[in-house]
Image (spheres, rainbow, N blue to C red):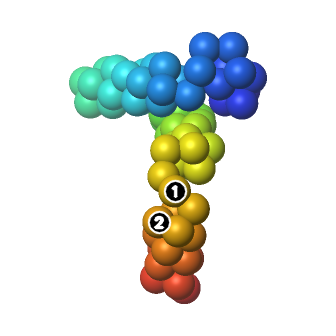
Amino acid sequence: ITFAVIDYIGRKKTIGFESLALGVCLVFIAPCTSGAFQSFLLFVMRGMAEGLFQATYVYTGEAYPNSIRALGIGWCASFSR
C-alpha cells in the first residue's frame, strides 16, 4: 500500500501522513479501554510503522549521495548483527 501511495502523492507527503497517522493512533490508544478497539489501533500502528520504514528507505536513496548512503547502510547492517 505504501508504494502505491508514494507513486500517487509523493515520498515526503507519504512520510508525513504515515507519521501523523501513527501519532494520532498513539494518542488514542492511551485512554482506550476496549480490547477490540485497542487491537485495531495496534494493527493500524504496526502497518503505519512498517510503511513509514519503507517510505524512508526509498527516500534516503534519493536524498543522500551514494558514498554516504553506502556507509550508513553498511554501518547499520553490521551494527544490527
In front of the other: 4 or 38 = 4
Please give the name of the residue rendered at 69% of the width and 14% of the height, measured from the top-left corner: 8
Give me the residue at 42% from left, 24% from top. Answer: 16
Query: Helix, strand, or loop for circle 2?
Result: helix
Tell me the kind of residue under disc 1.
Pro
26 relative to 74 in the view: left or right: left
Q: Which residue is mark 2?
A: 68
Query: How many numbered marks appear?
Result: 2
**Disc number at residue 65?**
1
In the structure shown, which secondary structural element does the residue marked by tag 1 occupy?
A: loop
Residue 79: image location, x then y, percent: 46, 82
Quadrant in which residue 7 is drawn: top right
Q: Residues within 10 Å of mark 2 (few under 14, many from 20)?
A: few
Residue in view at x 66 percent, y 29 percent: 2
Relative to 63, 50 lies left or right: right
Q: Position of residue 54 (x, y in %)?
A: 61, 43
Spot occupied by residue 30 in the image (x, y as percentages of width and height):
26, 30
Whether residue 47 is visible: yes
- Looking at the image, is 11 positioned above or below residue 58? above
Q: Residues within 10 Å of mark 1 (few under 14, many from 20)?
A: few
Q: Marks 2 and 1, how far apart in space?
A: 6 Å
Q: Are marks 2 and 1 in contact (CB under 8 Å)?
A: yes
Asked if 72 appears above or below 57 in the picture, the reply is below
Image quarter for residue 44? top right
Above or below for 23 versus 51: above
Percent of width and height locating residue 32: 33, 24
Disc 2 marks which amino acid?
Ile
62 lies above or below 31: below
Q: Quadrant of residue 22?
A: top left
Q: Is residue 73 visible?
A: no
